[in-house]
Image (cartoon, rainbow, N blue to C red):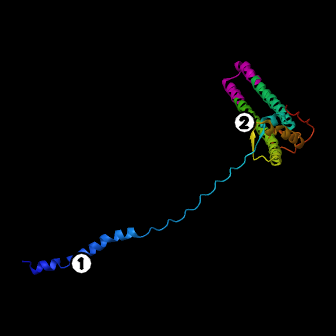
């Protein structure tokens, strides 16, 4: 015999089963619905056209070495070096003479006098070393300023040729293994460089260089 309590516990079973049947039937209904059409995909972008690169070649070392301005700078720097070397040689010779005199006279001098003379000679040696360093620095600065004058004009003429011939890149020949001779603009650059800058003025002591002056013969073009 089923008690009233048991009937109360199972009274909701029919409704629960109906709900379960409904739940189980929903996926089947969902599968019967027509699928939605996929969204159209955008067409892939066309690849960008590669940039056209036209390369020109210039021999920078040849321009510095063989141009009229380069030869002018080289000669002036050589003269400046000789002048500095002669000046330093005279100072060193004077120190050697004083040292020899001290060695000859030390027998007739007191130890205090010898020490005083030697300290004075050491001071003179240090002064000479400072002069040598100053001359080296002045020479380096004069060389650098002369090169900057020439480089500035080389860049101007090369840029002009680059625009005229439609080059997009200019390379130094020292960086190129093989090339087409028609790409070499060195001789044209040399001609224009000699016209614009026939010489440079190298100033001793590294002073600011003045304007270029004429008078130097143009270099022969390289064959």
Q: Quadrant of the C terminus?
A: top right
Q: What element carries label 2?
A: loop
Residue appearing at x 71%, y 22% in the figure: 109
Q: What's drawn in magenta, residue-wise?
A: 97-121
Quarter-of-image position of residue 194: top right
Q: State the image coordinates of residue 84 (x, y, percent, origin top left).
A: 80, 32
Q: Residue 15's mark?
A: 1
Q: State the image coordinates of residue 143 (x, y, percent, origin top left).
A: 79, 37
Residue receiving disc 2: 176
Residue 208 visible, this orientation: no
Residue 182 visible, this orientation: yes
Quarter-of-image position of residue 54: top right
Magenta-highlighted stretch: main secondary structure?
A: helix
Q: Does the magenta stretch include residue 158?
A: no
Q: Is mark 1 on a helix, strand or loop?
A: helix
Contact between labelled residues 2 and 1, with CB atoms less than 8 Å apart:
no
Of badges 1 and 2, the one in the foreground is 1
Between 50 and 121, the residue placed more toward the observer is 50
Query: Could you classify mark 1 by the number of other residues whose Cα lies within 10 Å: few (under 14), some (14-19), or many (20 or more)?
Result: few
Between 166 and 83, the residue placed more toward the observer is 166
């Amino acid at each position: 015999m089923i008690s009233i309590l048991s009937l109360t516990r199972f009274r909701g079973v029919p409704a629960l089963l109906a709900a379960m049947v409904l739940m189980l039937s929903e996926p089947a209904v969902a599968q019967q619905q027509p699928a939605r059409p996929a969204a159209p995909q955008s067409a892939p972008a066309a690849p960008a056209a590669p940039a056209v690169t036209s390369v020109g070649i210039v021999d920078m070392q040849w321009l510095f070495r063989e141009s009229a301005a380069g030869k002018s700078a080289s000669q002036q720097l050589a003269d400046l070096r000789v002048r500095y070397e002669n000046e330093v040689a005279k100072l060193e010779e004077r120190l050697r003479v004083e040292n020899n005199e001290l060695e000859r006279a030390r027998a007739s001098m007191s130890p205090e006098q010898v020490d005083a003379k030697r300290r004075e000679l050491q001071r003179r040696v240090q002064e000479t070393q400072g002069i040598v360093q100053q001359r080296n620095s002045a020479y380096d600065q004069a060389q650098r300023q002369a090169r900057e004058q020439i480089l500035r004009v080389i860049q101007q003429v090369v840029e002009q040729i680059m625009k005229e011939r439609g080059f997009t890149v200019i390379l130094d020949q020292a960086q190129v293994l093989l090339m087409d001779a028609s790409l070499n603009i060195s001789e044209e650059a040399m001609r224009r460089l000699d016209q614009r800058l026939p010489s440079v003025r190298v100033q001793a002591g590294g002073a600011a260089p003045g304007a270029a002056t004429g008078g130097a013969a143009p270099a022969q073009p390289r064959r």
